[in-house]
Image: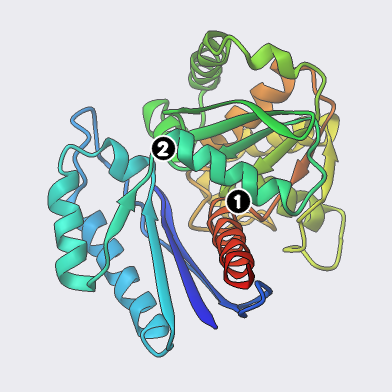
Amino acid sequence: MENLAVIDLGSNSVRMTISRISDDGTYETVAQEKEYVRLSENMGVEKILQPEAIERTIGALKNFKTIYSKLDHLNIVAVATAAVRQATNQKQFLKRVKNDIGINLNVISGTREAYYDYVGVSETLPATNAVIIDTGGASAEIVLVQNGKVSNLISIPIGSVTLSSKFDLADDIAATEVFKAMIFVNKIFQSVWWLRNGLNLPIIGLGGSNRTLAKINRRFNNLLDTNDIHGYQLRDDAINETFERIIGMNLDERKKVPGINKERADIIVGGLIPVILLMNYLDSDRIMFSTSGLREGILFERLHDIIQENIKTKE
């Protein structure tokens, strides 16, 4: 038996999933934790993690430690993504985490992150031919899946926090800024040579902003369990209508929208631009939402390793 704690330190939030894995490779989820830390806040063009953001992150990791330290047979896999990947003071931050928390934080590449997203999705949803997009705080991972296999994948340095900051999309939103943001993102999509191979394919959306899009629509349509969005689908017209409503609001109004977490209201517009534009760019008529991504991809990889170890032991 093994207790696997997967910690995912993103640009906006830090999350932990603890799974109890049996010797036969079956598992059950025993804990799921999330704290908003805004690690990428005010990094600026110098890409420096700021002291306040670092303290928030260390505090959250300490809270996680009080949970996982009570478990035996513990295996901790802790990964950091875009904010730490880009940070010029990365080494100092990793050392601080090691000293204060006692864990080794593994900074994974954007393509590795995209691959884990694919594993997390493909193990839990029908994704034979699809385009996966995981919009985080400081990066977006895109995976083209053809015939059930990864055809191409990429990580691009745009996310909910970075776009909202760069184009001033936090409160009252000027049409000129939304237009500039859309042109900026569209140019990036055009530079990805293989992306048009996903023309007309369904899109699978991951990440907090994309999940929020699903939650808003579920609340709007009075569906009972707002958080039950895994496999939930939306058509393009419903998505465009939702986006149109949100960009016409100021920050206080967005905070009151059912389905939008108050901690996310200032970055939701920037967070939705990538998926809105991707749907238009690929002329895709629907999006399916996934709550399974990076952390689950790491879990499934570990389960696969355990099953392989069991096979070798029996040989």
Q: Amino acid at mark 2?
A: Ala
Instruction: Name the residue carrying label 1.
Output: 293
Whole-angstrom CA distance, mark 2 to mark 1, is 16 Å
Residue drawn where x is 50% and y is 15% of the image: 188
Q: Which element carries disc 2, helix, strand or loop?
A: loop
Q: Which element carries disc 1, helix, strand or loop?
A: loop
- x, y percent for residue 103: 27, 67
Q: Is residue 69 left or right of residue 119?
A: left
- x, y percent for residue 30: 59, 81
Q: Is residue 296 above or below residue 167?
A: below
- Whether residue 139 is visible to the viewer of this picture, yes or no, is no
Residue drawn where x is 41% and y is 83% of the image: 67
User: Depth check: 304 or 130 in front?
Assistant: 304
**Disc 2 crowd, CA 10 A, few/some/many (<14, 14-19, 20+):** many
Q: Is residue 70 above or below residue 86?
A: below
Query: Mark on residue 138?
Result: 2
**Which quarter of the rendering shows the N terminus?**
bottom right
Image quadrant assignment for residue 201: top right
